[in-house]
């Protein structure tokens, strides 16, 4: 098994960039979805991204955004990877000259099979517990046994914490894990100790 990667999502403060990088995060997520409690502006993101060193991936999360809004953000913020959390079509996702992750709702009633079929060129699929059309970050776990066999990298999200991430990695064997609320004291306010413990636990099963 390859070493699992860890993405700390919903970064809103410079000190959380520093804490995540020092703890060994492989990627940092910056949210540009207005419905999220962790949404930041392009102006805020510029300063945050500037503090991210080489070899740490900078991910921008969007949800049903106007294409021009995404382009304006990309013109200001040097993002490596895009993450689409809504019902974006394939042509939409592929127009920005960046690799992208497509979020897939694993909640009851979601047609996750259709999403997997459509987005064949996605760099990875992020499996989350959010309801279809919801922004995620709910802190809720979905049934890991419901995960299908997917011939693509899987990023596991949804309710991961310091207490359950090692089990999640052991059972699911994902390419990466993604955490936001599980390492927070409040929405958008990360806890450095929780970040360190989460990353340590996530990589313990390797």
Image: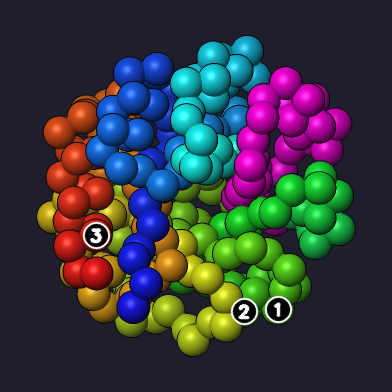
Residue visible at 67% across and 70% down?
115
Residue designated by label 2: 113
Q: Is residue 28 visible?
A: yes
Q: For numbered disc 1, what is the local secondary structure?
A: helix
Q: Position of residue 151 (x, y in %)?
A: 57, 83
Instruction: Give yes or no for residue 81 being in the magenta stretch.
Output: yes
Residue visible at 81% across and 47% down?
97
Kindly identify which numbered label has been placed on residue 178: none
| Foreground label between 3 and 1 | 3
Q: Position of residue 70 (x, y in %)?
A: 76, 34
Kindly identify which numbered label has been placed on residue 203: 3
Q: Tell whether 23 sits left or right of 69.
A: left
Image: magenta residue range:
62-87
Q: For numbered disc 3, what is the local secondary structure?
A: helix
Residue designated by label 1: 117
On-image quarter of the N terminus:
bottom left
Q: Tell whether 10 sits left or right of 15.
A: right
Whether the residues at callouts 1 and 2 have beta carbons within 8 Å, the answer is yes
Q: Is residue 173 above or below residue 131?
A: below
Q: Tell whether 3 sits left or right of 63.
A: left
Is 121 or 184 nearer to us in this picture? 121
Q: For numbered disc 2, what is the local secondary structure?
A: helix
């Amino acid at each position: 098994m390859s070493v699992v990667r860890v993405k700390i999502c919903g970064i809103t403060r410079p000190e959380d960039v520093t804490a995540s990088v020092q703890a060994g995060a492989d990627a940092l997520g910056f949210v540009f979805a207005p419905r999220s409690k962790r949404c930041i502006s392009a102006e805020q993101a510029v300063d945050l991204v500037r503090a991210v060193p080489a070899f740490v991936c900078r991910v921008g999360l969007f949800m049903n955004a106007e294409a021009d809004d995404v382009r304006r953000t990309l013109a200001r913020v040097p993002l490596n990877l895009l993450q689409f959390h809504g019902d974006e079509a394939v042509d939409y996702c592929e127009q920005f000259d960046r690799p992208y992750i497509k979020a897939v709702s694993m909640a009851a009633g979601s047609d996750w099979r259709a999403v997997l079929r459509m987005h064949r060129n996605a760099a990875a699929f992020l499996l989350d517990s959010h309801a279809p059309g919801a922004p995620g970050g709910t802190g809720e776990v979905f049934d890991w046994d419901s995960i299908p066999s997917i011939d693509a990298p899987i990023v596991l999200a949804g309710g991961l914490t310091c207490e359950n991430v090692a089990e999640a990695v052991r059972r699911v064997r994902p390419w990466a894990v993604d955490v936001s609320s599980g390492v927070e004291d409040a929405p958008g306010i990360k806890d450095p100790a929780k970040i360190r413990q989460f990353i340590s636990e996530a990589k313990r099963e390797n």
